[in-house]
Amino acid sequence: MADTTGQLSDNAANTPAARNAIGALIILLLAFAPQLVELAMALAGQIAALAVRSPLQVMSAHGAALVESLPALVRQWAEGGKITLRSDALLVLIYTYPLMAIALFTWLVRPRAPQDYFGGVVLMAIALFALWAASDLSGMRGFTFGPGTAPRMLGVLLLGMGAAVAVIGLVTEGPSLQIYHWRGPLFVSLAILSFAVAIRPLGLIVAALASFLIAALGTSETRWGETLIVGVVLTLGCALLFPYVLGLPMPLFPRLLVQ
Amino acid sequence: MLDLFQNLAHGFAVALSPINLLLCLVGALVGTLVGVLPGIGTIATVAMLLPITFGLPPVGALIMLAGIYYGAQYGGSTTSILVNIPGEATSVVTTLDGFQMAKQGRAGPALSIAAIGSFVAGCAATVLIAVLGAPLTRLALLFGPAEYFSLMVLGLIFAVVLAKGSVLKAVAMIALGLLLSMVGADLETGASRMSFNIPELADGLGFATVAMGVFGFAEIIRNLDSGAESDRELVQQKITGLMPTRKDLAESAPAIFRGTILGSILGILPGGGAVIASFAAYTFEKKIARDPSRFGRGAIAGVAAPESANNAAAQTSFIPLLTLGIPPNAVMALMVGAMTIHGIQPGPQVMQKQPDLVWGMIASMWIGNLMLIIINLPLVGIWVRLLRVPYRLMFPSIVVFCAIGIYSINNAPVDVILAGAFGLFGYWLIKHDFEPAPLLLGMVLGTLMEENLRRTLQISRGDWSVFITRPLSAALLAIAAALLVLAVLPALRRKRDEVFVEG
């Protein structure tokens, strides 16, 4: 969740004049991050033929939830009785709407310590998301805790703490946002991701070398000659160390070659 | 009393046999070498090397495991100091000042003091186990769930007090850490909590995954930022002396002494004793220091105190294991596993039935510590030289090691991706001036806290007042409240001063 904002706040830091509009936009994007992530995973699922909801289903379900959830809540509340809403609708009610409100608020105000303000807002977002994620768990049964009790208590605590940090960042003078860089975070994450994807089908040698070289793209200081040599030596070292010396079960070569 | 020293002598007779000495040496050496790889901490090292002890006789196997454990722990501290990656929860605090010392070119003294502090604490704790083992176990028995909960609250407050920045942000980080610990199966009902049907999350987030992310990967990413280059150059250029100076020793000797005492006491309590011990020792040093602002900027006492405390605690945490059969942490749980494989049921009867084993192991811990210092003081130079490797080659290597290390824990690619995500999150935390250490402590203690809270309320039938009516628990909570007030007061005063200045 927060990772997405982390990278995106980049723009916010570079343009102090228009910071509020951009800050508000980023929070708005954060408000829809779970839906977007699910959509992205649905698209990836199409390609990898995984059993997830199809992209169209995801879009229609979340779209409907966005429109229907509030009227449905009011209707069920007016009728009395137990409130039962679908998970998508709850997500909108617990997470998306409050964050949209915060985004609107952000657009209207000028926080005096943006670093704390946006930090607090993201913590609130995490807390709201956790409250939604724990909403399917049962709470107190008599005097004993249910599985959902502690997560909900902590969710509320974190929400309060996030709000306090944000309010203090709003009213007291403090540091502005630090500049985010894209190159390091992008290539290091890509290196980690490629290792995770490659280790099972392609084996340790390919995964380690690829990940080493991708990570090396993360800085302009890299000299490719020495990097390639060190990468190959390190990969061979790992290939000897982990499966043989330490006896860890790890595929060394691509699955296709082994067969 | 005499009896105890006779037992101890018997233990040394067992542990000093050439074959057991050799096993201990090999264990400590291998443990150090594996533990020093960034990304592979104590738990992972012991888990990996556990199988090589299976073929040995029980006493030899446990002696070798003790060696591996101390070696791995020291290896973990080495990465904390050199590359800011704590191998396990107990060395999180070491990163605060250890890494700063490395940045100032004083990695050698930091590593040496860590080894010396561990050795001194180990010697003291060994004697303590022999003398106080039985009576102290009675104290641990006084602790019910309410007391454990209050103790852990105190531990978390320690984390708040030692955080550098605002108290509010530190509390927020603890809340987040506790929340993260809730992910996975519920302890009592087994209900899957906040795991989004991802099978790898059903067991909860691993400590190694989160620690590697918010400390390891985040630090690497931050170092790649332009502007951080000058910072790094500094690390590589000036390395001043490998051994601690007389001044360093004078500064750290009292810290080692206090850390040992705190660690020995807290280590006996099952449940994160060693973790709380290292945090508590650091906080204590910072509170009584003449100039607390030096902490977090490379104060040698900030390395000496937590390193001796965690080693003392690690040692005394054998007491609940050997006497009650309760493993106080993950490594001890692995030890229990090893014991059961050799047909030994840990618990009160071990002390009577297998004195060879118990006292042999206690003696071997001291020998393990000695091996540690013999092996590692000469190696300090080599570890420090690692810092001279240019960062452009160093960081991709750390990324690869960490990735392999995390993958090897559960053979789960998802864990690697999660660690990467936590790395980005840790980068974001740095950018917004949040501290990751309280988050990690909250995550480690979260499960235990919830368990004890639920148990307490079940016993008291929903009555929360037990926490203040039970004297031990009330005392612990009172200390926690007092510490929190002490932490908040200076902040308030500063704010007020600012207001006055502005006015």
Image (cartoon, coloured by chain):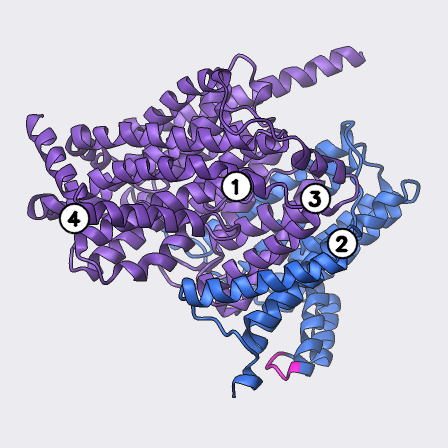
Chain colours: A blue, B purple
Estimate how packed mark 4 is, as few (under 14), some (14 to 19) or many (20 or more) residues with alpha carbons within 10 Å. Answer: some
The CA distance from mark 3 to mark 1 is: 20 Å
Left or right of B196 in this view: B266: left
Q: Chain of mark 1?
A: B
Disc number lying in front (3 or 1):
1
Q: Which mark is residue B121?
A: none
Query: Picture quarter containing residue B164?
Result: top right
Which region of the structure is painted magenta?
A48-52
Q: Position of residue B187 (x, y in %)?
A: 37, 57
Any magenta on residue A51? yes
Q: Which residue is mark 2?
A: A222
Q: Which residue is mark 4?
A: B347
Q: Position of residue A68 (x, y in %)?
A: 72, 69
Q: Residue at x 18, y 29 (%)?
A: B132
Q: Chain of mark 2?
A: A
- Tell me which amino acid carries mark 1: Trp
Q: Is residue B335 above or below residue A158?
A: below
Query: Tag 2's secondary structure?
Result: loop
The CA distance from mark 4 to mark 1 is: 40 Å
Q: Which mark is residue B383?
A: 1
The CA distance from mark 2 to mark 1 is: 23 Å
Pointers 3 and 2 in contact (CB under 8 A)?
no
Q: Residue at x 43, y 67 (%)?
A: A244
Query: Mark 4 vs mark 3: which is more N-terminal?
Result: 3
- Tell me which amino acid carries mark 4: Gly
Query: Tag 1's secondary structure?
Result: helix
